[in-house]
Amino acid sequence: MNTLASRTLELPRRAGPRVLWLALALVLASLLALAWGASAGSTGFDSLLRMRDDPAAWQIVMDIRLPRTLGAWLAGALLALAGAVAQGLFRNPLADPFLLGSASGAALGVALAYAALGVGGMVAGGGSVALLQAASPWMGRLGFTGAAFLGALAGVLLALVLARGVQQTLRLLLAGVVVGFVLGAVRDLVQLAQPDVLQAMQGFTLGVTGFVGWSGCAVMLVVLAPLLLLSLSLARVLDALSLGESTAISLGLPLAPMRALLVGVLALATGAAVAQTGLIGFVGLVAPHLARSMARCTHGPLLLLSTLVGGLLLTLADVASRLVIAPQELPVGVLTAVLGGAYLLWLMHRRAGVGAVQ
């Protein structure tokens, strides 16, 4: 068993150069996607060409398009990183970042913020902090972004309490599902009590990137960088867990604290992304699958490739959401759900066909 584990935990020599070239290609594709996103809009490339001489064009690109596109990349990277960690931690290829109740907690946090505000008609992320301050000083200091982030963390912490820690992944998985349903029901009750909240929550539940500014990008970047480094340092734990818990214990790994750190990565990455863009599904689920199809590697390279793939996917989806029904915009969460669901159905069909042939 130890021989098998050592072979599995070692990165194949042939995968190293391939992973490096794939990472460089994904970085280049992301830069091109960022340039495309900076030019996507009603004025097209003209705004880019007139930036030096036209203050309005400069403001359109630098204050609206570029932070939105970069924010989409960062949110996609965070969700993909969380998805790769979740799939490795739970040894389940269908695990996604919202598995531990973070999505329901974030949605409940925003709903409570709107309920405290007492008015509807605003999209999550674009609400007025001044109005929140007038309704509740504490909620005004927190803001919609902070309410979503704290709600996501509260959902994960509640799942941890119900599961009595991180020792048993199956119990933690079931606790996360229960917490998701319970917090979702509480959110529905809040919306029934104040119907205006339902309209205000529409943008958050559909997933939007249009309100991400430079401050939101800075927050997500500050969260992404250390979490990626931490997850890469814990990749060996995910490799060991993929061989079974008994094998991981035989390797002498302190599973309890390392699992807690992985759950922390999952919660913080998901909370940071959801707080800025709302509920954007399928990116965290699909990106690791795409990364695995590109290179057969252990979790270290997989986490890096998944992060890059997720950022590129959501950036392209954000640009497409502006162009599909232009001059109107399609919520990016709707587009990722359609495309992600279609990809997973195709993947299941292909694997079923391969199994039948074998």
Image: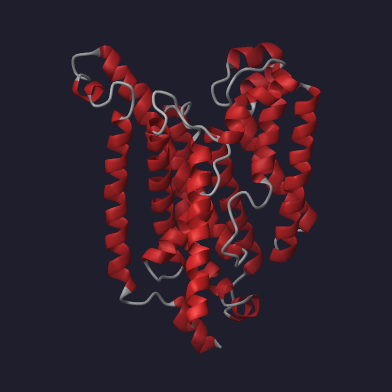
Location of residue 36 by image quarter? top left
- Going 70% across and 42% down the picture, which residue do you hit? 154
Q: Quadrant of residue 197?
A: top right
Residue at 73 percent across and 53 percent down: it is 177
Left or right: where does residue 179 sit relative to residue 332?
A: right
From the top left corner, tell me how far across and down residue 201 is, in percent.
64, 27
Classify residue 321 as left or right of residue 32: right
Query: Where, quadrant-wise, is the N terminus in this rendering?
Result: bottom right
Colour setup of the view: secondary structure
Q: Nearer the viewer, residue 347 or 207?
A: 347
Q: Position of residue 41 (x, y in %)?
A: 34, 25
For residue 159, say whether it is visible. yes
Residue 25 appears at what percent x and percent y?
A: 27, 55
Give the total of numbered labels: 0
- Whether residue 271 is situated above or below residue 120 in the rendered picture: below
Residue at the (81%, 24%) spot, across then down: 193
- Left or right side of 281 for 39: left
Q: Is residue 136 above or below residue 232?
A: above
Q: Residue 174 in the image: x percent, y percent?
A: 74, 58
User: Height in image: 214 above or below 79?
Assistant: above
Q: Is residue 81 visible?
A: no
Q: Nearer the viewer, residue 315 or 11?
A: 315
Q: Residue at x 79, y 54 (%)?
A: 162
